[in-house]
């Protein structure tokens, strides 16, 4: 291979490394945890799902997503931007045929492509409410 070809490979490799080591700006999310998932009314089969975020920068947006066990997903609820670090979704249908997933989006930004998920977004999958 000629030096031009090696130089091009080196440039592509260096660009990839630079993208992979991009930095978070602001405070990264340090944890995102499920606080409770419980049915609060057996009569109406309604429940609550509560989560808590540590780190990150407000405002935060919380999303509740139904995962139909491999048959698709559907966004059930999305919060308005908020400064709350604890958030509860109320009147969530209790159902044994699918899972819920909660996502939080922080106002952090990132440089590069890889850390965006680590800086800005966290997800808690496979939440059952039955």
Image (spheres, grey):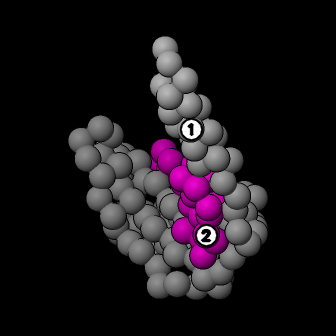
* 97 is higher (above) or lower (below) than 43: above
Front one among 37 and 73: 73
- In reply to whether residue 117 is colored magenta, the answer given is yes
* 2 is higher (above) or lower (below) than 87: above
Query: Does residue 20 appear in this view?
Result: no
The circle drawn on residue 126 is none
* 17 is higher (above) or lower (below) than 106: above
x, y percent for residue 105: 55, 68
Q: Quadrant of residue 20?
A: top right
- Kindly give the residue lying farthest to the top in the view shown: 1
Q: Quadrant of residue 6?
A: top right
What is the C-alpha distance between the residues marked 2 and 1? 26 Å
- In reply to whether residue 24 is colored magenta, the answer given is no
Q: Dots 2 and 1: beta carbons under 8 Å?
A: no
Give the mark, 2 or 1, whose residue is nearer the N terminus. Answer: 1
Q: Quadrant of residue 58?
A: bottom right
Q: Which residues are magenta?
A: 105-130
x, y percent for residue 19: 59, 48
Residue ID at (64%, 47%): 18
Mark 1 lies on residue: 11
x, y percent for residue 26: 73, 72
Front one among 80 and 48: 80
Q: Dot 2 surroundings within 10 Å: few (below 14), some, or many (20 or more)?
A: some
Callout 2 secondary element: strand
x, y percent for residue 55: 75, 67
Mark 2 lies on residue: 109
Residue ID at (55%, 66%): 104
Total marks shown come to 2
Q: Left or right of 51: which side holds 30? A: right
Q: Left or right of 128: which side holds 35? A: right
Q: Dot 1 surroundings within 10 Å: few (below 14), some, or many (20 or more)?
A: few
Residue ID at (47%, 85%): 80
């Amino acid at each position: 291979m000629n030096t031009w070809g090696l130089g091009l490979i080196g440039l592509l490799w260096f660009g990839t490394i630079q993208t992979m080591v991009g930095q978070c700006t602001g405070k990264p999310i340090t944890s995102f945890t499920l606080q409770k998932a419980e049915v609060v009314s057996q009569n109406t089969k309604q429940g609550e799902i509560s989560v808590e975020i540590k780190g990150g920068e407000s405002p935060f947006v919380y999303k509740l997503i139904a995962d139909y066990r491999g048959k698709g997903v559907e966004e059930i609820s999305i919060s308005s931007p908020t400064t709350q670090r604890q958030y509860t979704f109320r009147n969530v249908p209790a159902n044994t045929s699918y899972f819920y997933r909660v996502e939080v989006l922080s106002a952090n930004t990132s440089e590069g492509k890889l850390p965006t998920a680590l800086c800005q977004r966290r997800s808690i999958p496979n939440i059952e409410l039955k």
